[in-house]
Image (tube, helix red, strand yellow):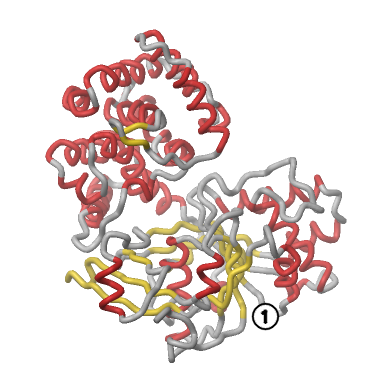
Amino acid sequence: MRLNKETFKEYKKYPEKVLQFGEGNFLRAFVDWQIDKMNKEADFNGSVVVVQPIEFGLVDKLNEQDGLYTLYLQGIKDGKAVKEHSVMNSISRGVNPYIQYDEYLKVAENPDLRFIISNTTEAGITFDENDRLEDKPQKSFPGKLTSFLYHRFKAFNGDKNKGFIIIPCELIDRNGEKLKDAILKFAELWNLEGEFVSWINDANTFCCSLVDRIVTGYPRDTINEITKELGYEDNLVNVAEQFHLWVIEGPQWVKDEFPVEMAGLNVKFVDDMTPYRTRKVRILNGAHTALVPVSYLYGLDTVGQSVEHEVVGEFIKGVIYDEIIPTLDLPEDELKYFAGAVLERFMNPFVNHYLMSIALNSMSKFETRDLPSLLEYINRKGEIPKKLVFSLAALIEFYKGKRGEEEIKLADDAEILDLYKATWESYDGTQEGLKNVVVTILSYEKNWKINLNEVQGLTDAVTNCLIKIENLGIKEALKEVM
């Protein structure tokens, strides 16, 4: 028996109030879960139309199950280990603009639509000057969104009451502002009328936001047991921790329309999200990203295994306490308390958080999550942070695409994968050849925003680590750096 509205007797249809770019595990375990709770506990009375942001995704599976899926929340709740599950009934349908572009635009004609949410990874909010209004669809997420907004503008003749509250969840600084900036650039590139630009500015509210919940996704190692427990088949089972935090920087009136407080959710509407963002991105996400290449090459597969490992666990604790915390300006006691909570979450006994599920777009993740700590450490201490540099070297090794004889399924922008492929294929087996690999990667300014070879001592430090990883193997190399 498959989960769908015929088999789920409590199925309810709600007006479509939210357009969501992204159908992945995170949004379904975070935003869509919160909307489900608001429907049940705060009379939000709204559902989500999901837009598939890339050509291949989960929209078909979502539609086969009428937007329904089972969410397991597992972790520490009120000081106790709690495991619970329920069916999410907040998604009305999914749309694939690559084959349903007209249907995608038609959603803009719905007067009930009020919110736009997105999570298209750190690489998603980018301005692609090759996008055109007549494309079906545009390649970039901001291009698709600009086309959608323009259709909305025309459908309602520029009605200022038909704008949106737009809350991107991509883990980049000032995500709402950057998304708005990209949209305005497209309006200029496409020569759209000034009235549309005024409508964007006056009728729409762009909020910056910060999201925090560890989502491990589809439990492939236990799905047979879960299916037996549930009594039905669900191809979209999702697993996340109990903890959640959403910090939204925007006007206080937004929460009147988005009743998260009435639903008892841990959502904060603030005037400045900067302190929350810096702490979370540098410590939690920075630790994740620094950990992945080191631990995976070491032979481990999950975050929990890594943190509890005698050597790798000490490495990641050293990254956090010795090299990240000293670069932050919040009180040290507060930072250490937060770090301890993060490590506790990493060791959640219910969660198998696979390293490869974090590895998507690792280059852009390192740039946003770890590079600021690395550079600030050099700025404050006048020396190289050995563990973060080792992680960077391990990342370059990781993109070689091999763990012993096993192929690593790399997932990143095609240009980055092509760069690594060409760079490693040109490696001649010498130490000088490894330095050339490092120089090439560190000079990739499109990702790093600067030429990292210009940071004094960094090229040699990364090269020395990479030489040790190549010659000694990751285990012996890590022992040396520790």
Q: Which residue is mark 1?
A: 112
Q: Position of residue 142 (x, y in %)?
A: 66, 52
Position of residue 71 relative to residue 332, above or below, is below
Q: Nearer the viewer, residue 472 or 16?
A: 472
Residue furthest bottom in the image? 9
**Quadrant in which the C terminus is drawn:** top left
Left or right, 351 with respect to 130, comes to left
Which quadrant holds residue 372?
top left
Left or right, 119 with respect to 33, comes to right
Position of residue 247 relative to residue 230, above or below, is above
Query: Which residue is pictured at 57% across the width and 85% down the height?
Result: 14
The secondary element bearing badge 1 is classed as loop
Q: Position of residue 326 (x, y in %)?
A: 29, 36
Query: Which residue is pictured at 23% across the width and 55% down the height?
Result: 341
Query: Which residue is pictured at 33% across the width and 29% down the height?
Result: 394
Q: Position of residue 365 (x, y in %)?
A: 44, 41
Q: Position of residue 138 (x, y in %)?
A: 71, 51
Left or right, 479 with respect to 364, comes to left
Q: Nearer the viewer, residue 101 or 84?
A: 101
Residue 253 visible, this orientation: no
Query: Which residue is pictured at 21% across the width and 72% down the height?
Result: 82
Which quadrant holds residue 382?
top left
Residue furthest left in the image? 310
Q: Nearer the viewer, residue 21 or 41?
A: 21
Q: Residues within 10 Å of mark 1 (few under 14, many from 20)?
A: few
Residue 299 visible, this orientation: yes
